[in-house]
Amino acid sequence: MSFLRGSGDFIDNLPRIYGFYTGGFIIFIILMAILEQMGVKADTIGILFVAFTVLIYAGIGWLSRTMQGDAYYVAGRQVPPVFNGMATAADWMSGASFVAMAGGIYMGGHAYLAFVVGWTGGYVLVAVLMAPYLRKFGCYTVPDFIGTRYGGNLARFCAVVVLVVASFTYVTAQINATGTIASRALRDSFRGRRVVRPARHPALLDARRHARGDLDPGGPVHRADHRLSGSGDLDVEQAGLRSGSSARLR
Amino acid sequence: MSDDASQRAEHWRRTKSLMIVHLIIWFVFAYLLHWFAPQLNGMSILGFPLGFYMAAQGSLIVFVVQLFIFVRQQDRIDVECGMAEDS
């Protein structure tokens, strides 16, 4: 995969790389469909999905690693606008949009659409107020731009505070969505979990278990005896302590 | 040098008016329209109440189209005033 690292022919190769990735993704989906038809368990397919995603991201990150600021922030200013646009569009279609927003609109109705209007309209604000000047100022980040434009570290600091607060809110929704999706795929409740031991992480144990068909909401009590009945090699005292008599009845 | 300065002034003048126009459009479709959503809901488009439809799709379509138009216009201003980035 050394073609990713070349500098001169990077742009020429970009469509090929994107095609490679998209084609690989489609092939993967088809493969999963075939596996499903062949009767592979939903658990296995879920894990393959998660593993594939993680591996792809790790691979992309590793292949495009860099030590240069220019390359880190703006990909060496080599990526054509169309591809940047695709990346931005992918940002819009994030976990927060898919999971949090769909649920929010379902629960909140018309009023919740304010989020959609707000963050789509936000692109207009960024385009009108930031984009024409960001590159002309030679800055990489918004705080850089604010600091340069308004002079001084106070302005820069204010920009940083605003960014951190906004990003934190956003990342919270994002991680929540990721956790929800992962817990579906791995059949493990990330909310109900009280004990997480790195040595034998519950997700891995749950994944090994046979499909039971019950996607339970995963309260701690239920989880505990669920765990007990599934594989007997778990610590009985702990589960017994947590779920009380229901564990012993089994 | 004076030519450069006048070009900069011209660039800023045109950029500023473009910015104001687009901010007004943004304000109309981000806020103004939705303030009157209850009234607009009386009308219907594609079977949806208009106020709801504008929040769900209408405003978003306007924003996306506006972004394309804005980029085109800003690019033209940059080129004509000699401020274009070499790319």
Image (cartoon, coloured by chain):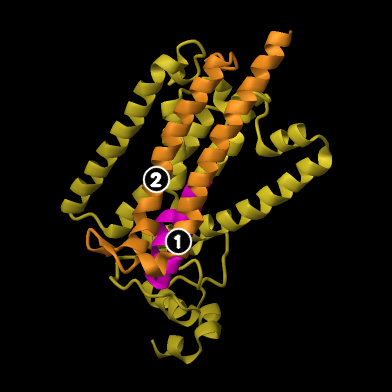
Q: Are marks 1 and 2 on the same chain?
A: yes
Residue A115 magenta-highlighted: yes
Q: Position of residue A182 (x, y in %)?
A: 43, 57
Q: Residue at x 36, y 46 (%)?
A: B61
- Which mark identifies residue A12? none
Q: Quadrant of residue A141?
A: top right
Checking the image for residue B34, the label placed there is 1
Separation of residues labelled 1 and 2 (CA atoms): 14 Å
- Front residue of A28/A98: it is A98
Q: Looking at the image, is mark 1 or mark 2 earlier in the sequence?
A: 1
> In the rendered structure, which segment of residues is drawn in magenta?
A97-122
The residue tagged 2 is: B62
Mark 1 vs 2: CB contact within 8 A: no
Image colour assigned to chain A: yellow
Task: Say above or below: A134 vs A174.
Answer: above
Q: Quadrant of the N terminus of chain B?
A: top right
